[in-house]
Image: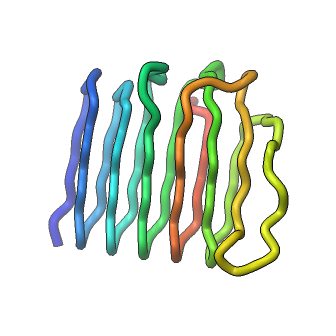
Amino acid sequence: LMDIYVDGFSSEIEAVNSRGDIVLTNITGPVIAENDRGSVIVEFSKINQELPSSIVVARGGIDVKMPANSKFSFRAKTPVGDFYTDFDFTSSSRKGSSYRERGISGEINNGGVFINLQSLKGDVYLRKLE
């Protein structure tokens, strides 16, 4: 098992891991993170509005934190897990009726850059950074 840790980075990050966690803290993104067996934990200090971010995990959870005033649009998909957020958001998605369609899309603070969050077998958390 090997974990990937990045702290205090204000540019594009691409992190790929097959066994172990990916932990990115005090970053601005954009982020492309892929993990096969392990969690992805991301703490944005602010959201770069130039390019979209994507976090995809096969077997593990996703935990993303960002400032409460962040503006972004998102899609969260987790066929087996659950989606949790403490952000107020406007939903722009239809409820998925099939196993593969289970997800939600929305806008936080009137929307902005797109963030994709997808976990095949795990929960997805989208939280305000305290």
Quarter of the picture holding the C terminus: top right
Report x, y in % for residue 71: 63, 22
24 relative position to 68: left or right: left
Quarter of the picture holding the N terminus: bottom left
Q: Quadrant of residue 122?
A: bottom right
Query: Relative to 67, is 88 above or below?
Result: below
8 relative position to 91: left or right: left
92 relative position to 119: left or right: right
Query: Relative to 96, is 115 above or below?
Result: above
Q: Quadrant of residue 103?
A: bottom right
Q: Which residue does the image show at 72% across and 33% down from the upper left?
A: 107
Q: Which residue does the image show at 78% across and 68% down from the upper left?
A: 96
Q: Which residue does the image show at 24% across and 57% down from the upper left?
A: 16
Report x, y in % for residue 51: 42, 27
54 relative position to 33: left or right: right
Report x, y in % for residue 70: 60, 22
- Residue at far left of view: 2
Q: Which is nearer the eye, 86 or 12?
A: 12
Q: Which residue does the image show at 61% across and 67% down from the upper left?
A: 78
Q: State the scheme by which the image is colored.
A: rainbow
Report x, y in % for residue 50: 43, 20
* Number of numbered discs visible in the structure rendering: 0
